[in-house]
Image: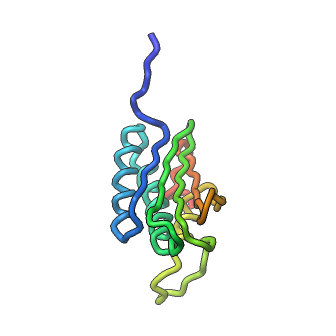
Amino acid sequence: MIEQSLRPASVTHRFPRNRRSPGQARRAFRGWAAAQGLGPTAIEAGELVLGELASNAVLAATGPGRRIEIQFALTGGTLRIEVSDAGDGTPVVRSPGPLDEHGRGMVVVEALADAWGVADRPGPGKTVWGVLKVNGPDPLTSW
C-alpha cells in the first residue's frame, strides 16, 4: 500500500505589506512546520529567520508592490524560507551598536541559517532566502 501525505512540502502565502504581516507569517509557518513533523527547535529557528526576513520585506518594500510573498519548503532535512517583496536594495549584515534601534535582523538570520542569499525575481523587487538544516546540530545552541 502506498501512503500519500496530505501535508504539502512547500507552501506559499501572500500578505499585505503592513506591520501585522510578519506575525501572521510566523503563525502560518508554525502550523505548517508542526504538520511537517519538525521539532520545536527547528520551528523556533525557522520562525526567527522568517520573522526577520518578513519584517525587512515590510520595511523595504517601497516599490510598486503592495504585498509580500512568503514560501516555506521542506526537502529531506533542509528547510528553505523565501520572502519576496517589490523593494529595491539588498539586505546586509550590519554591526549595530548597543543603542541602535535597527540593524540586527540579518545578524540573526546569519547566525541561525546555514546559508542565505538574495535572488532576482520577475518584475520589481527581490527574493531573500534562508536555508536551515533541520537534521543535525541544534541551530539555537551550536554557535
Residue 115 visible here:
yes
Q: Position of residue 21 (x, y in %)?
A: 37, 63
Q: Residue at x 60, y 78 (%)?
A: 94
Relative vertical location of residue 109 with respect to residue 76 in this rendering, above or below: below
Quadrant location, the C terminus: bottom right
Q: Given the current orientation, which residue lies at the most extreme top position? A: 1
- Residue at x-position 52% and y-position 67%: 108
Q: How many marks?
A: 0
List x then y, in percent, for residue 65: 49, 66
Give the residue drawn at x 66%, y 60%.
Answer: 120
Where does residue 73 sit, x and y in percent of width and height? 52, 44
Rendered position, 44 above or below 32: below
Name, please, the residue furthest toward the bottom: 99
Residue 19 sits in which quadrant? bottom left
Quarter the N terminus occupies: top left
Q: Residue at x 52, y 64 (%)?
A: 85
